[in-house]
Amino acid sequence: PIPSLKELFKNDFLIGTAMDARQIRKEDAVADALIQQQFNAVTPENCMKAENIQPGWDTYDFDLADQLVAYAQKNNMKVNAHTLIWHSQLPAFLHKIQDADSVRMYFENHISTVAGRYDGKVYSWDVVNEALNDDGTLRKSVFLDKLGDNYIVEAFRLAQKAAPHTKLYYNDYNIEQPAKRAGAIAIIKKIQAAGVRIDGVGIQGHWKAGAVPLKDVEESIKTFGALGIEVLFTELDLTVLPNPWDHSTADVSATAQGNEKMNPYATGLPDTVQQTLAKSYEDLFKLFVKYKKQIGRITFWGVNDGQSWLNDWPISGRTNYPLLFDRSFKPKSAFYKVIATA
Ligand code: XIL
């Protein structure tokens, strides 16, 4: 049998995976067995996002989210609910609302209804997701525009009221980078200064194989940890493909299909790249183990390469290899490097 990540790291941190509709509905028995064997934490990849869980002003759809919670309960896994307040994947009706009072009413209803329903059933919430620009300033969004820059503190205050038994996290990408990290620290300190509870900060961890910012990650674990909160790695995956927005390595006008430059590994991953990926995962996990006292959870953004969002982002139709299990659920060299750090 394949060694189990959750067993190997059970005294260090939780080991999680994202689950999307296919996995929640157990459409693939192999995936299901692997999830149960490897992970003790799950994050809904899409079903708890605002557009899905509250598609209309007065309409909620809890079906998949409830199934995920039941699945986790049955298999003794912790659910990190994702996410209450985010500028993206918002319901269409919200984009049509112009007045601040209605936005505020939506904001309060959404947080209390959704967080309230799952209190005591989920372990934690990503209360606010991706509120920062890379320079550390607050990102433009309907919430910033209509509610003002106190909206993050307000979101945590409402979540604390609705979900007193649930851990509350701020989650974002690139916050290991100094400028954006400073923005995250300011958010956390502001919440704390308001006397509102924040239990942790999630670093998403969408990095590039061979270019993981290890020094910044280490500095971030130390600095965030010093604020008295948990550090989580919440959406870990390491792309092996060129970024179409990066003019130095890629062709911005590219589409993926049949484009060797943008989709170079359509027929398989060369061994050299496989090793680069494995090394990056090994370096990261060495760091995670070193700081296990500060770290609450490491979650992979998907179970295997075939179902990763990175096959379709930032351009669609590519073949990516960012995770520990390949398209037939076989552990890759990266998996073996990771378990050797335990
Ligand atoms: C992604 C999902 O993986 C995709 O299926 C969806 O189409 C878009 O969102 N940061 C986040 C996640 O916080 O919610 C995003 O998930 C990936 C980036």
Image (cartoon, rainbow, N blue to C red):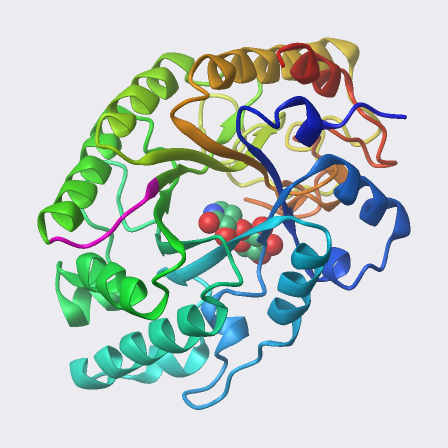
Left-right relation of 122 to 39: left
Picture quarter with the C terminus: top right
In terms of image quadrants, where is residue 186?
top left
Q: Position of residue 333 (x, y in %)?
A: 76, 15
Q: Nearer the viewer, residue 238 or 43?
A: 43
User: Magenta span has 196?
Assistant: yes
Q: Residue at x 38, y 25 (%)?
A: 294
Residue 210 appears in the rendering? no
Left-right relation of 135 to 209: left
Q: Position of residue 284 (x, y in %)?
A: 52, 17
Left-right relation of 121 to 225: right
Write the start and end of the magenta stretch as one range: 195-200
Q: Position of residue 273 (x, y in %)?
A: 69, 14
Q: Residue furthest left?
A: 193
- Can you say whether 215 is above or below 143 in the image? above
- Can you say whether 43 is above or below 273 in the image? below
Q: Main secondary structure of the magenta part?
A: loop
Q: Residue at x 64, y 32 (%)?
A: 262
- Can you say whether 69 is above or below 181 in the image? below
Q: Nearer the viewer, residue 12 or 34?
A: 12
